[in-house]
Amino acid sequence: MGFINDFKAFAMKGNVVDMAVGVIIGGAFGKIVSSVVADLIMPFVGLLLGGHSVSDLKVVLKDAVVQGEEVVQEAVTWNYGAFLQNVIDFLIVALCIFFIVKGIAKMSELRKKEEEEAPAPDPEPSAEEKLLTEIRDLMKNQQK
């Protein structure tokens, strides 16, 4: 039972839960960015390349072996288009994360600046100061 309690304490620590949430959101964010690259950006790049899909770009290293209508051995290809699409995908994800981290840092900096600018309230007078203030006020009232 000690192992289960130790694991439960570890899993429920704030950092582990925060990291898990970050991984889940990051995975979903990666899918969105991959879709933006594959479905929105790359078709335009393909048009610039003469109407070819970037992910279909390849160099045939060895042709397929065909006997009649049956393919005996598949062609050996170097699929640089899929690699190129993944590189562009990575660069866009990295750029988005850069902007998010930069924005969070800016917001944190502004929040710290606001906290520094806010004046600290005057400290509560000590019991001795309160007593001396009362004595002073009583002496002023007696002089009048």
Image (cartoon, rainbow, N blue to C red):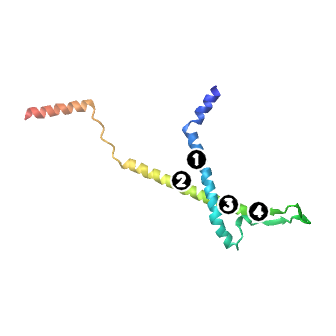
Q: Relative to 144, is 61 on the left or the right?
A: right
How far apart, in angstroms, are the residues tagged by discs 1 and 4?
A: 32 Å
Mark 3 and mark 1 lie on one chain; the one further toward the N terminus is 1
Number of numbered discs present? 4
Q: Amino acid at mark 1?
A: Gly
Upstream in sequence: badge 1 or badge 2? 1
Q: Mark 3 sits on what residue? A: 87
Tag shown at residue 79:
4
Image point (20%, 31%), residue name: 132
* First in sequence: mark 1 vs mark 4: 1
Spatial separation of the CA atoms under disc 3 and disc 4:
13 Å
Instruction: Pick whichever of labels 3 and 4 is earlier in the sequence.
Output: 4
Considering only order in the chain, which callout, 3 or 2, is on the residue closer to the N terminus? 3
* Disc 3 element: helix
| Position in image of residue 34 (x %, y %) | 64, 58
Q: CA distance from mark 4 to mark 2?
A: 34 Å
Task: Classify the position of the C terminus by image quarter.
Answer: top left
Q: Are marks 2 and 3 in contact (CB under 8 Å)?
A: no
Asked if labels 4 and 3 touch by Cβ distance under 8 angstroms, the answer is no
